[in-house]
Image: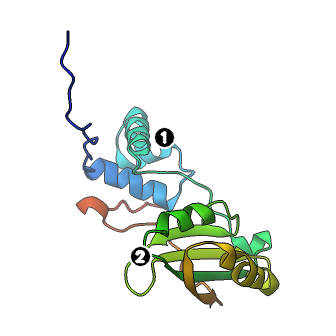
Amino acid sequence: MGQENDAPPRKPRQRLLDSTDSKILSLLQLNGRASYREIARELGVSEGTVRGRANRMQADGVLTIAAIADPAKLGYSVMAFTLLKVQIGRQQAVIDALMPWDEITYISSCTGHADLYVQLVCRDHEHLWQILHERLPEVDGVTSAETFQEIKMHKVSYVYPNFAGGTPATPTA
């Protein structure tokens, strides 16, 4: 008979990105539609190297390739963010209650004078009003909300510079 192992399961080891990984990631951040062939040519490596490394980074959760739409061009003319204070012990329940809301594009836990940061996209001011004054008060555990409306975005970037100590790739013409 085998002995039972009471040791907790080990977390997968986080791999560090080497210079080639970092350059692949940098190029994909600049253009997520770049082909592996284009990236391979740019870096002077094989297409298989790029494919394998990109697949590994995706499997490791380092890389996600996504299409990001402009909410204003989709009919969401009001963007806002709300800082929520939550009753102690109710944070996960509040997160779970808010996750399904289509208008919420981002939720994060934070420290300081608020417990949660929530980004909202709304069709108009009436839609924002409905969320803040009709729907949000029904969420058990929220004690207060401070909302700020974005009036103009000046920079939106999902490119992280010099990550993991690697050398960012710069595309050539």
Q: Is residue 103 visible?
A: yes
Residue at the top extreme of this rendering: 1
- Kindly indicate whether the residue at mark 2 contacts the one at mark 1 (C-beta within 8 angstroms): no
Disc 1 marks a residue whose amino acid type is Arg
Could you tell me which residue is drawn at 21 percent across and 23 percent down?
4
Q: Quadrant of residue 59?
A: top left
Note whether 132 is above or below 66 in the view shown.
Answer: below
Viewer-closest of 137 and 102 = 137
Determine which of the numbered discs, if any, sits on residue 78 in the image. Answer: none
Q: Position of residue 76 (x, y in %)?
A: 76, 75
Disc 2 marks a residue whose amino acid type is Cys
- Quick check: 70 left or right of 31? right
**Label 2 sits on residue:** 110
Could you tell me which secondary element the residue under label 1 belongs to?
Answer: helix
Q: Quadrant of residue 103?
A: bottom right
Which dot, 1 or 2, sits closer to the camera?
2
Viewer-closest of 22 and 46 = 22
Viewer-closest of 99 and 49 = 99
Q: Position of residue 69 (x, y in %)?
A: 67, 64
Could you tell me which residue is drawn at 37 percent across and 40 percent down?
53
Image quadrant where one finds the N terminus: top left
Color encoding of the figure? rainbow
Determine which of the numbered discs, if any, sits on residue 37 in the image. Answer: 1
Note whether 91 is above or below 59 in the view shown.
Answer: below
Could you tell me which residue is drawn at 26 percent across and 46 percent down?
15
Q: Quadrant of residue 106?
A: bottom right
